[in-house]
Amino acid sequence: MKGLAIVAVLIIAANGLSEQEKWQQFKIQHGRTYRTLLEEKRRFEIFKFNLRTIEEHNERYHNGEETFEMRINQFGDMTQEEFKRMLALQKPQIPLPSGDEVSFDNVKDIPKTVDWREKGAVTEVKKQGNCASCWAFSAVGSIEGQVFLKNGSLESLSAQNLVDCAGIEYGNFGCEGGLMDYAFNYTHQHGILSDAEYPYWGFTRRCTKQGGVKITGYKHVSKGDEVVLAKAVATIGPISIALDVSHIMFYRRGIVSKSCGCKNSENDLNHGVLLVGYGDGYWIVKNSWGTIWGEQGYFRLKKDAGNTCGVATWPSYPIL
């Protein structure tokens, strides 16, 4: 709570500051140090470019020309290309293990809104850091939801367990990227431990422990079908999805739409996240970039608008 209060003070204080003052504030807030003065100068130039990009975007947002607002965050000294390289959701390198496709008799009989956070099926927002472990956090989130729905208890499960143990032989590359379906395949065979048993370090280590919660398999949701996806979210629980998030590194609040430039083909998907609900015209998505990013670690996507950013391109969920 104290940390959030400090962040709020820093954000308020940022209004009216010079670029140099904002830079100093950014370095303090995010613990940035640089090896040389030349490197710091280069990062400051990137930071200034990002600040101006955000200011221009937000001016359009306040004029009703954009659907979401931006702000500087932990990615403030990174170029967009560096940000994209950090995402690293793997494309299938080995044949995907078989997963049946879910089917429903009636896809339209669903609530107008669903939010699994309110039902207690979603753990706190995590922070993956500099490790490209989004795939692990996405898979873990959907398993946590299914465990809650089966047992009535919510436990934070270990993304690090997957990073370390569900490696190359399963098609994943630890902090260099992976895939949720591969993570489900590993969990089916070996199980997954809790965060308490196998805490997060944010880099790939030797696999030290196996066991824990096992799943019996996993299923896919019909590719590109947001109606079926809504039914799955409403009746099954949080769903693992992959998105193109190339253009939302500085997202603050609002509803992301196709106007941001995101794409929805399999080849463009670069980040694993967790779909935890939907509202009137939007999907609710849990990210793994900490609570400072976005709407306290979450963001919203335009719903029923042609598969925004790939929300319905690659959805899957585990079966206990």
Image: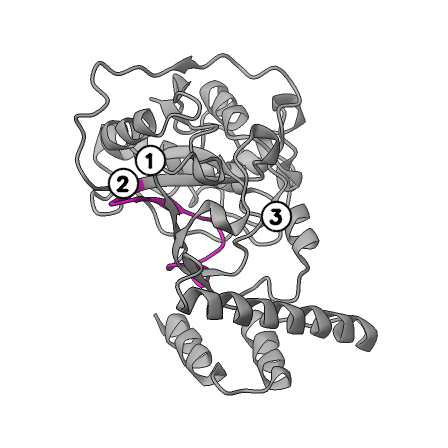
The reply to whether discs 2 and 3 touch (Cβ–Cβ < 8 Å) is no
Residue 158 can be seen, yes or no: no
For the residues labelled 1 and 2, the Cα–Cα distance comes to 8 Å
Select label 3 or label 1 by which is in front. 1
Mark drawn on residue 121: 2
Residue type (three-letter) at the residue carrying disc 1: Pro
Magenta-colored stretch includes residue 284: yes
Instruction: Identify the residue shown where x is 61% and y is 48%.
Output: 131
Identify the secondary structure beneath mark 3. Answer: loop
Rendering coords of residue 280 (x, y %) = 24, 45
Magenta-colored stretch includes residue 257: no
Residue type (three-letter) at the residue carrying disc 3: Cys
Rendering coords of residue 206 (x, y %) = 65, 37
Instruction: Identify the residue shown where x is 45% and y is 26%.
Output: 191
Q: Quadrant of residue 24?
A: bottom right
Residue 222 can be seen, yes or no: yes
Secondary structure mostly taken by the magenta-highlighted segment of the chain: loop
The reply to whether discs 1 and 2 touch (Cβ–Cβ < 8 Å) is yes
Which quadrant is the C terminus positioned in?
Answer: top left
Does label 2 or label 3 sit earlier along the sequence?
2
Which quadrant is the N terminus positioned in?
Answer: bottom left
Magenta segment: 277-296
Q: Which sits in the foreground, 49 or 78?
A: 49
Does label 3 or label 1 sit earlier along the sequence?
3
Instruction: Identify the residue shown where x is 59% and y is 67%.
Output: 53
For the residues labelled 3 and 1, the Cα–Cα distance comes to 23 Å
Instruction: Identify the residue shown where x is 42% and y is 81%.
Output: 12
Q: Residues within 10 Å of mark 3 (few under 14, many from 20)?
A: some
Q: Which residue is mark 1?
A: 238
Q: Quadrant of residue 116?
A: top left
